Image (cartoon, rainbow, N blue to C red):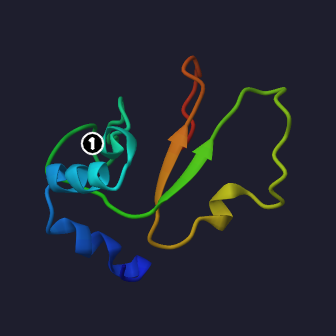
Amino acid sequence: MGSRENFGELLQQYSTCDISDALTMLGSPHGGCLPDISMWSPQRQEGHTRIAGPAYTVHFVRRGTEPSTIKEHYIDSVPAGTVIFISAPPDAANAVYG
């Protein structure tokens, strides 16, 4: 596969269905579908914006949970060209980013 810098360009030529079919053939559960994800930027689910790239996952937890062993703030370790995927407790009462 190409470098991280051209990953998005490489995938732009394929539809979501093409990518899902390929992931299914490679054994990815549910064709790589992650249910209940929606884009919130620049506007929620609006326009023709598409994003693609390697995922950098961040899992927010409730206060009082065992602290992370990561020595730096997560945002300072995000590699260039990645898409940040943030997960938070479902009943979080505030924004988790932005």
For residue 98, say whether it is visible. no
23 vs 54, nearest the viewer: 23
Foreground residue, 98 or 80? 80
Q: In the image, residue 58 lies at what x, y percent? A: 60, 47
The percent position of residue 79, horizontal first and vertical second, equals 56, 70
> Which residue is drawn at the image coordinates 32% and 42% (left, top)?
39
Q: Residue at x 84, y 51 (%)?
A: 69
Snapshot quadrant of residue 35 = top left
Disc 1 designates what residue? 43
Number of numbered discs: 1
Query: Hey, what amino acid is under mark 1?
Result: Gln
Q: Quadrant of residue 1?
A: bottom left
Q: Is residue 30 left or right of residue 74?
A: left
**Can you say whether 79 is above or below 84 in the image?**
below
Residue drawn at (53%, 43%) of the image: 86
Nearest the eye: 39 or 27: 27
Q: Secondary structure at mark 1?
A: loop
Q: Locate residue 97, reporting x and y percent.
A: 55, 43
In the rendered image, residue 50, in percent from the top left (x then y), is placed at 23, 55
- Side of 33 where 47 appears, left or right: left
